[in-house]
Amino acid sequence: MADSEALPSLAGDPVAVEALLRAVFGVVVDEAIQKGTSASQKCHYSIQKGAAFLGLGTDSVRVVKADERGKMVPEDLERQIGMAEAEGAVPFLVSATSGTTVLGAFDPLEAIADVCQRHGLWLHVDAAWGGSVLLSQTHRHLLDGIQRADSVAWNPHKLLAAGLQCSALLLQDTSNLLKRCHGSQASYLFQQDKFYDVALDTGDKVVQCGRRVDCLKLWLMWKAQGDQGLERRIDQAFALARYLVEEIKKREGLELVMEPEFVNVCFWFVPPSLRGKQDSPDYHERLSKVAPVLKERMVKEGSMMIGYQPHGTRGNFFRVVVANPALTCADMDFLLNELERLGQDL
């Protein structure tokens, strides 16, 4: 709900299907929860896709309001739960987000956990993007309350830059519930009378059968970098994002969407023809057309790649995600200089 909360819902990663199956495992849903009509829908697209895959239907997802920074509003979560129950529906899962895709927002997990505790709801946290921040002593406060989640999805292949793909589903439950949810006891694969401990056969726990040993990527990287090495990688990303923000503030024609709390730096490039014309009736419409033009130019030049998107009522803006550990301040300077060069005639 918020930038990714829902009743029921999934995280921003396929492993969240398992979390939702666990919630379904212990509850009977009498009727679909009707989708909220007044909520902003900023959640990761996999939430509705997962509900469809599970047969719950996309109408079973009720999206909760986010504030201006993209964080879930706990008071609206409480309200949505009350509305769902009044309609005779059975809420059973809340999916919060630590590190939203566009703005990099972190939902207030302590307050959300309080709501879930009062109503007996499963709390899942989509920390696919922001979960690695826990490795930083300086910035881990952004995930305060995550220890109260029933399940957490984490993608080390994102901020930690582990090889694709590398995803983890972390559970409070210690009852081997993935085996209970997914196990099919196929005797031609998972024989119980092997000469070694059959608990080592983890294949029956997952949705798919054949898969890569993705955990090895994380283990090898952690072994090579160590706790301190990975922490430095996170802190460096935050520091470089801060450098980019300060440089944006110094330059004419660059405007921050908001002060970032993560490494997602969102901003507009205002071309010379639009500077000082913020009061023009067509200003925002014209500004929204700038990012697509610049994206085409940079791709055809082969100089860089920056994503852009609209967000709510905001027109297209650039989103620079400062995550590559090889990036430097010189790269940030080049990025801004190149934008100015490509857009000087607009």
Image: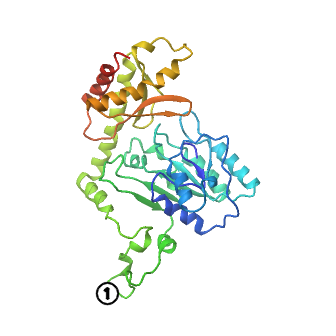
Residue 282's place in the image compared with 64, above or below, is above
What colour scheme does the image use?
rainbow
Q: Count the marks: how many? A: 1
Left or right of 228 in this view: 80? right
Residue at 37% from the left image edge and 45% from the top image edge: 136
Query: Residue 117 or 47: which is nearer the viewer?
Result: 47
Give how far across and how far down residue 38 sits, in percent. 67, 40
In terms of image quadrants, where is residue 88?
A: bottom right
The image shows residue 97, relative to residue 24, as above or below, that is: above
Instruction: Locate the C terminus and report the quarter of the image it occupies.
Output: top left
Residue 73 visible in rendering: yes
Q: What secondary structure is found at the residue carrying circle 1?
A: loop
How far from the left and from the top, in percent, is residue 316? Answer: 47, 29
Q: Amino acid at mark 1?
A: Phe
Residue 258 appearing in the image = no
- What is the crowding at mark 1: few (fewer than 14 residues within 10 Å), some, or many (at least 20)? few
Can you give x and y, in whole percent of width and height, for residue 162 in the image?
30, 52
| Residue 91 spot, x, y in % from top left | 66, 57
Name, please, the residue furthest toward the top.
276
- Residue 213, quarter of picture: bottom left
Q: Which residue is mark 1?
A: 195
- Residue at 28% across / 55% down in the picture? 222
Residue at the image position 48 percent from the left and 43 percent from the top = 100
Horizontal side of 107 relative to 75 (left or right) equals left
